[in-house]
Image (cartoon, rainbow, N blue to C red):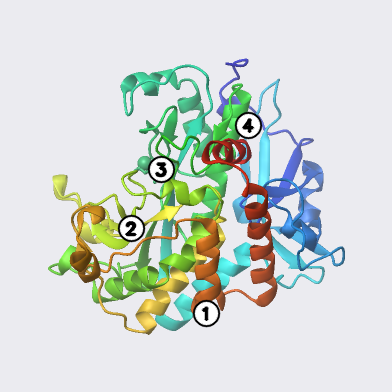
Amino acid sequence: MGQRHGDPRDAEVSATGLVALVCCDLGAIVRGRSVPASELGERLADGVSWVPANHALTPLGPVADPNPFGSTGDLRLLPDPATRVSVGGDDIVPALEFLLCDIVETDGLAWECCPRTFLRDALAELEAELDVRVMASFEQEFQLMREAPAALPFSLEAQRRAEPFATDVMRALEQAGAEPERFFPEYAPHQFEVPVEVAEGIAGADRCVVVREVVREIARREGMRASFAPLLDPEQAGNGVHIHLNLIDAAGASMLYEAGRPGALSEFGERFAAGILEHARALSALTAPSPVSALRLRPHSWSAGAMCLGQRNRESLLRIPPLVSIDGGDPAGQLHLEYRGADGAANPYIALAAIVRAGLDGVRSEMPAPPILEHDPSQLDAADAERYGVGALPASLEEALQAFAEDEVVRGWMGPLLYDAYVSVKRAELAAAANLDAGELCRRYAAIY
Ligand code: GLU
Ligand code: MG
């Protein structure tokens, strides 16, 4: 372990330090430019320069070739002041300071490929049409890449061996305003999870980016690397990103809960869930979008082995988590849907927007309620699988891109330029992955995410 750093709460954020103005790109890599803190006031007004082709950079390094942008055009990264993150540094490492940005044209109008705008538009459509708002929390797993033998899953030993990193992460996330709830060891070697409080709309997806970057920062400071890659080892469990979402009406009341119905899910909730399942194969091109992602989603890895709605069922793509009634817990405040099919290679704005739009399609089309499956979907015979609507997720990114291309509803959510750019990046990744076996693929992506 590297040199021990001070408590980040004690350190002052330097007025002369650097502040990064960043965006999360199509491959979920956070990129941008830093400015001196003293200049931030001006840059909040006009941003910093950016280039369209940056949005065709692949997570592997090179720019996708071909891509729809070429060498022309100019953009701005325009910071959203509400997203400012400051995690104090010390005398060794300067503070981590960044703001998340919209990507805009040089006149300030939204750029058609900006992921935050893509989510903003989806949320605005949901609100305009149904007067419904989204509360979201991204539950993310990651692994510390350490040589030392791992302690047992979920053990106190694993928790204690993760100190002081664990406590430092919680403090740093609090300082960053990400409202961490817990830190705990997970099943795979050196795997941990840090759930955070739900936040409304874009702030929920912003928080997903903040958690990834703050966890990586604290690991770096302590001489380690934290990887959010979907799968580090083909023989082990992967790192999931489970997107928890609730839908609330204008008064803040749950649109999903209704006592006495199956799963306590309202008719609105059933239709919303049905829309997500209807488009699930195409959605996975946006939520599990790397060449390793499908390997994590195989059955019996407690990720999302099948496309169905389940309750207390960790093999289902969409789950209704349990309602806790101890101590008079309020079920209406707890009930939500958990989409288990996302991972750290997904851009959280695009993933959440796609889930919301799929749900909205289910509500608009009054799709029939998906049955709630209580058992392992892989145990069903063909007739029951049909009855429960259980289908298989795409077995590869290639299949997911095919499903995306064929699902005109999902494809139509993106303008042609964004669609082309997205598919160019993903095709470039597939080409680079073509000759790698599962182990090599995992190693390559572990080094990126
Ligand atoms: N590691 C599992 C996944 O890849 C999730 C396990 C759990 O938290 O239920 O999604
Ligand atoms: Mg977990």
82, 274: nearer the viewer: 274
Question: Between tags 2 and 4, which lies in front?
Answer: 2
Q: Mark 1 belongs to which amino acid?
A: Glu
Left or right: 82, with 391 as reference point: right
Q: Residues within 10 Å of mark 2 (few under 14, many from 20)?
A: many
Find numbered disc 4 in the image and state the secondary structure of the residue it sits on: loop
Residue drawn at (49%, 76%), measured in percent from left and top? 407
Residue drawn at (72%, 70%), measured in percent from left and top? 111
Mark 2–mark 1 contact, CB under 8 Å?
no
- Please, is residue 73 above or below residue 360 in the view? above
Of the numbered discs 2 and 1, the one sitting upstream in the chain is: 2
> Can see residue 131?
no
> Which residue is labeled 2 in the image?
306
Q: Residues within 10 Å of mark 4 (few under 14, many from 20)?
A: many
> Which residue is labeled 1 in the image?
408
Question: Between tags 2 and 3, which lies in front?
Answer: 2
Residue drawn at (63%, 58%), measured in percent from left and top? 426
Left or right: 45, with 207 as reference point: right
Q: CA distance from mark 3 to mark 1?
A: 34 Å
> Which residue is labeled 4 in the image?
88
Of the numbered discs 3 and 1, the one sitting upstream in the chain is: 3
x, y percentage for residue 226? Answer: 55, 32
Residue drawn at (42%, 35%), measured in percent from left and top? 235
4, 375: nearer the viewer: 375
- Please, is residue 208 above or below residue 267 in the view? above
